[in-house]
Image: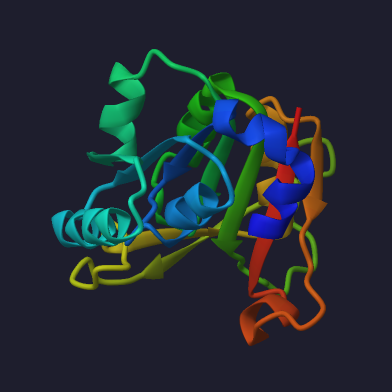
Amino acid sequence: MLSTIERLVPADQRAATSILDIGGGEGAMSIGLWQIGFRDITMLEARPLNIEKAKFAGNHFHAGIQFKLTTIEDFLQKNDKNYDITLFMGLLYHLLNPFEILKSIGLLTNRHMIIESALAQPRLNGFDNRADYSPSDAGFFVRIDTVLSQTAGLSDFELWPNMAAVKTLVQYAGFNELQLLEGKNPPKDFASNSRMIALASK
């Protein structure tokens, strides 16, 4: 992910390029971006323990990141700023209102969004609905989880999109292109298409 952003933004433009890291966890991505020259970074995280760890790590690396303890919903209601690049990693399938949230993210993102998510891989063989009134193959699939983990969502329910649903969401949010980011030796879940990471661009 860092190499993709390095490629998108020349070194002499990074200090003036604004980054929004949504659901940044313990701050690894934001701090990594700070270390390669980005200086306008805002990181959102809903769990107090994670934000404290992120602040500790940020202080260690002398990173002037704006850490905000907030849910994405609360942030979007109050935010009045646009960002050049948005990181939206590991959060999509925890949302119960993905269309509303992605639309809002699209409105505040000037150029690019890095999106990462678990993917459902259903075995579908069409629908029994009549041909002129039938859904597409873009879908979300419910998984029951627990909110007890520091890496879980804020609800016991997860909505896993399939790849067709991700493409639909990204287009609905106002992005024109979606490019999968595939490394040479991807982790098992990415190699098996159980997870995906992609660059959405306007």
Work out whether residue 142 can be spotted.
yes
Q: Nearer the viewer, residue 33 or 189?
A: 33
Which residue is drawn at the image coordinates 34% and 37% (left, top)? 72
Q: Position of residue 28 (x, y in %)?
A: 43, 62
Instruction: Look at the image and tell me in which quarter the N terminus lies.
Output: bottom right
In which image quadrant can residue 177 be found? Answer: top right
> Which residue lies most toward the top here?
80
In the displayed structure image, the side of residue 50 where residue 62 appears, left or right: right
Which residue is drawn at the image coordinates 71% and 49% (left, top)? 6
Work out whether residue 135 can be spotted.
no
In the displayed structure image, the side of residue 11 where residue 148 appears, left or right: left
Which residue is drawn at the image coordinates 26% and 29% (left, top)? 74
Q: Nearer the viewer, residue 42 or 99?
A: 42
What scheme was used to colour the molecule?
Answer: rainbow
Q: Position of residue 95 (x, y in %)?
A: 41, 48
In the displayed structure image, the side of residue 178 where residue 38 appears, left or right: left
Q: Position of residue 167 (x, y in %)?
A: 73, 45
